Amino acid sequence: MSSSPGKFIFLLKSKNPITYIELRQAVGKSMLLGLEILIAADIMATVVTEPSLKSVSILGLIVLIRTFLSLSLQVELEGEFRWQKFKIENSKKDK
């Protein structure tokens, strides 16, 4: 998977230039991946060190904040929540 700025520069010079929406989606997906990696790193850091009530509560707060950011970023990229997409697809199959 290539980085968003690298992909942008490559496609800028190609015959099929990248659109704003494609760039926005690529950057958004990179940000989502980064948030997931940071959550995993925080969990590992808490497990490796001696877990105390304070460190676990801070980890929980960080995970909640990053989960909220991930959900809001995903809604911004796709225009709907993930469960709404499946609900729409299932209602189309029923008809």
Image (cartoon, rainbow, N blue to C red):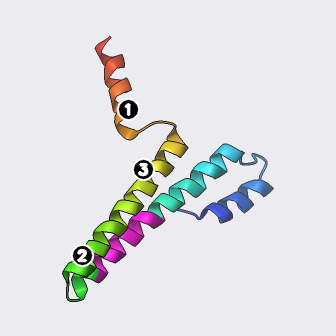
Q: Which residue is mark 1?
A: 84
- Tell whether position 76 is magenta: no
What percent of the width, then of the height, locates residue 17? 76, 48
Mark 3: give few (<14), some (14-19) or many (20+) Cα within 10 Å. Answer: some
Q: Which residue is mark 3?
A: 71
Disc 1 versus disc 2: distance between alpha carbons? 32 Å
Mark 1: give few (<14), some (14-19) or many (20+) Cα within 10 Å. Answer: few
Q: Secondary structure at mark 2?
A: helix
Left/right of residue 28 with respect to residue 83 in the rendered view: right
Residue type (three-letter) at the residue carrying disc 3: Leu
Q: Secondary structure at mark 1?
A: helix
Q: Residue furthest front?
A: 54
Residue located 74% across and 61% down the image: 9
Q: Residue 2's image quarter? A: bottom right
Q: Secondary structure at mark 3?
A: helix
Residue located 26% across and 73% down the image: 57
Q: Which residue is mark 2?
A: 56
Tell me the magenta residue range: 34-45
- Whether 62 is drawn above or below 80: the answer is below
Nearer-N-terminus badge (1/2): 2
Location of the C terminus (image quadrant):
top left
What percent of the width, then of the height, locates residue 80? 46, 36
Q: Nearer the viewer, mark 1 or mark 2?
A: 2
Mark 2: give few (<14), some (14-19) or many (20+) Cα within 10 Å. Answer: some
Residue type (three-letter) at the residue carrying disc 1: Gln
Give the overall secondary structure of the magenta segment: helix
